[in-house]
Amino acid sequence: MMYPEDKQKMREWIWKTLEDKKLLDSPKPGYGRIPNFKGAEKAAQMLRGTEEWMESEMIFSSPDSAQTKVREYALRDEKLLIMASPKLKKGYLLVDSKNLDGHEKSASTIRGAFKYGKTLKHFPVVDLVVEGSVAVDLSGRRLGKGGGYGDQEISHLFREKSIHGDTPLVTTIHEIQIVKEVPTEPHDKKINMIVTSQDVIRIR
């Protein structure tokens, strides 16, 4: 299959393909967003079953809708959750599953994280990072929606020494979002684990 070689054209190709194949859940349209793909919940279940997940106590997640179930499972599994605020305008939030009293589903949303979480001032060690993506390839190159927020989040975690080279950097996506090669620039950050509704791909 031929894929666009330009970043924005590749985003538009992915968004259109997901829409044409009716593979998008709300919010719609998917254009301009990290797409909330059909199968996101099953991908979250796949991630939940991995050794990396089971060994983690502190999970970092982007705020994207496609990763809502990932955040909910983190809280249901009594893990600590750090969530980036949308566009990083309000920094980062820490949600402690011990303080939710059955409100894990609500706390996994952006509004709920602000309600039940607290602003994070000092980064702890993070055991697993989950980012939303528009496209990825099997070398770990990742394409976001164009704002650079995912790269900023990963860079911040490295600067704070919250993560290291062996930390699982995961994205949950639809299989269609795996492309032959994502166009990259020097500042782009790679991931090392791809999880779909059908498979777990570890990148060494």
Image (cartoon, rainbow, N blue to C red):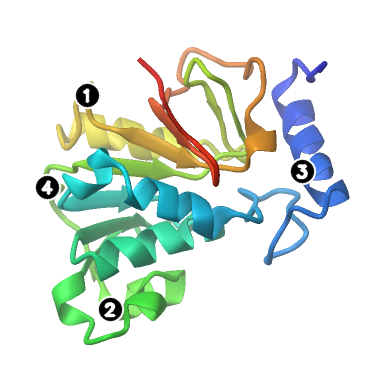
Which residue is under mark 2?
116
Earlier in the chain: of badge 2 and badge 1, it is 2
Q: Earlier in the sequence, mark 4 or mark 2?
A: 2
Q: Amino acid at mark 3?
A: Trp
Query: On the rendered structure, is 28 left or right of 38?
Result: right
Q: Residues within 10 Å of mark 1 (few under 14, many from 20)?
A: few
Q: Residue at x 82, y 40 (%)?
A: 17
Query: Mark 3, residues whose alpha carbon is within 10 Å: few (<14), some, or many (≥20)?
Result: many
Q: Quadrant of the C terminus?
A: top left
SS class of the residue under badge 2? Answer: helix
For this rendering, which residue is in front, 133 or 73? Answer: 73
Name the residue that disc number 3 marks.
15
Can you say whether 137 is above or below 54 in the image? above
Marks 4/1 in contact by CB < 8 Å: the verdict is: no
Which badge, 4 or 3, is on the more N-terminal residue? 3
As helix, strand or loop, the secondary structure at mark 4 comes to loop
Q: Which mark is residue 166?
A: 1
Q: Is residue 85 visible?
A: no
Q: Please state which amino acid type lies under the numbered disc 1.
A: Asp
Disc 4 and disc 2: Cα gap in Å?
19 Å
Where in the figure is residue 49, as x and y percent of width and height? 33, 49
N-term mark: 3 or 2: 3
